Image (cartoon, grey):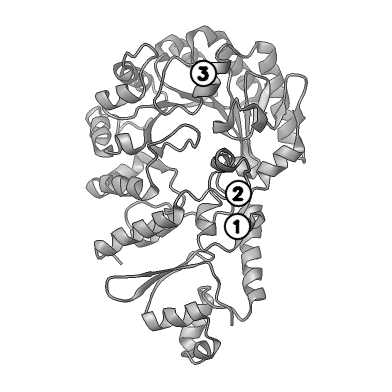
Amino acid sequence: MFVPKKIIYKKSFDGNYLVINSTTGMIDIMEEELVKVLRECDEEKLSQLDSTLLKKLEDRGYIFPSEEAYKKLYRDIYEKFASQKQPKIFAICPTYSCNLKCTYCYEEDVIDKKSDLKMSTEMIDKVFEAINEISNSPKYVESSENVFYLYGGEPLMPENKYLVEYIFEKMKQIDKKIEILTNGTTIKKYIDLFEKYRDQLFQIQISLDGIEEVHDYRRPFKNGKGTFKEIVENVELLLSKNFKVVLRVNVDEENLDLRTVYDFIKDMGWKNNINFMSIFSRVMCPKTFKHKVSENKFLKEVNEIFKYDNSAKTTYMVRDIKLLAHISTVLESGKLDMNVPPLFNYCDSTDGRYFAFCPDGKIYPCDQSVGIDELAIGTFTDGLQIDFEKYLKWRNRKTINMEKCRNCEIELFCGGGCALASWVANNDIYQPSCEGYKETINEYLEDLIERRMI
């Protein structure tokens, strides 16, 4: 018999063990004696177990007739994962310029060096030619659909209004909608354009990092003036005109008190607006950020909101919970439902589905890699030119291809971690970015044990 290594064992307060199978996703409570037999992979003792228990252990993926039988299941799970079609993401970044100076900006170096760059209408034509070629070529990963984003820098800088209108016209020609990612300070200057191209505008995502004093510290104008009041007025304006608004709260250790921003959103009356949604998202940038919050702390804060108001689930989305998504969904049923399939990769970038077109004429594979020349996977100004060695390196960054991940018990919960973080730390995206993941899972389980939940 064979017992896989991808199993987490955690002793609970009553002496029993919580056993988590990261291959199959099964989570069970087992007695200490059974756990000892599994850990030792004692074939003699395994064969002496009750036949009903043996069958259950086999059905739930804790034991296999042979190592080859386990490897077959693992390959089958990977093939199912790999066969699922997801959207291609095309991000259009007409400028690196920005009017804010956020404390956690991941483009800070790029903005300093390349803020004078912006696309021309001719470059935008080339962007859409490249998108058409990528969409229709078998050289790239198959996808279910195309998704479009407009971002920067700040894409809605007033001086770039003609470029944004040109992009809207291109979207109209291909009969697609685009989502705008903006800091929300210049909406009034663009509202007429949004009205004109309502059919091409999917939704507008605006960042608001907390109540006024918190947000204004984190996301001020370059002159230090606060942006909170202006953003709130602009959200009100957009909702009054029935545009879809996604309010993004970028969360780290400095603004972890999510209840205050939740209460503000509720008091503003946005929570019950059919065109409003909010996203709680951890600040993830590995290049500049020092106050990153662990999944466990973040999840605990979010769950407190849903515990306080279960209806909040219809208005609030939670992003950047990967490691604990499945475990918390099973163990804290009724709170946050984030049941996800096994993760062989970390994000869209390591699936070959993300293409960011930037004003330096380059294409980047990750939203946080924009402007870093050595990470570009191609160019588009003289026709689409993709460096397929680089593209495939990102596309194939799966744990199944990463030696240090293949025998790790949490492999399929973390997906190898962030590729960009690996590049920053090791200059090699095929090194795993573990970022204390095992400690985070242990901390989460310890918290549940302390609360007598497991």
| Element class at badge 3 | loop
Residue 102 x %, y %: 40, 23
| Element class at badge 2 | loop
Query: Of tags 3 and 2, which is closer to the observer?
Result: 2
Q: Say if 335 sits above or below 259 in the image.
A: below
**Separation of residues labelled 3 and 2 (CA atoms):** 33 Å
- For badge 1, the amino acid type reads Lys
Please name the residue shown 38% across and 15% down the image: 221
Q: Say if 341 sits above or below 88 in the image.
A: below
- Label 3, on which residue? 155
Residue situated in front as seen by the camera: 344 or 115 = 115
Residue 304 x %, y %: 26, 47
Residue situated in front as seen by the camera: 47 or 435 = 435
- Label 2, on which residue? 431
Residue 397 x %, y %: 64, 48
Residue 63 lies left or right of residue 186; in this view the side is: right
Label drawn at residue 306: none
Precedes in sequence: disc 1 or disc 3: 3
Label drawn at residue 404: 1
- For badge 3, the amino acid type reads Pro
Please name the residue shown 56% across and 51% down the image: 416
Q: Residues within 10 Å of mark 3 (few under 14, many from 20)?
A: many
- For badge 2, the amino acid type reads Gln
Cβ atoms at labels 2 and 1 below 8 Å apart: yes
Please name the residue shown 46% across and 83% down the image: 37
Cβ atoms at labels 3 and 2 below 8 Å apart: no
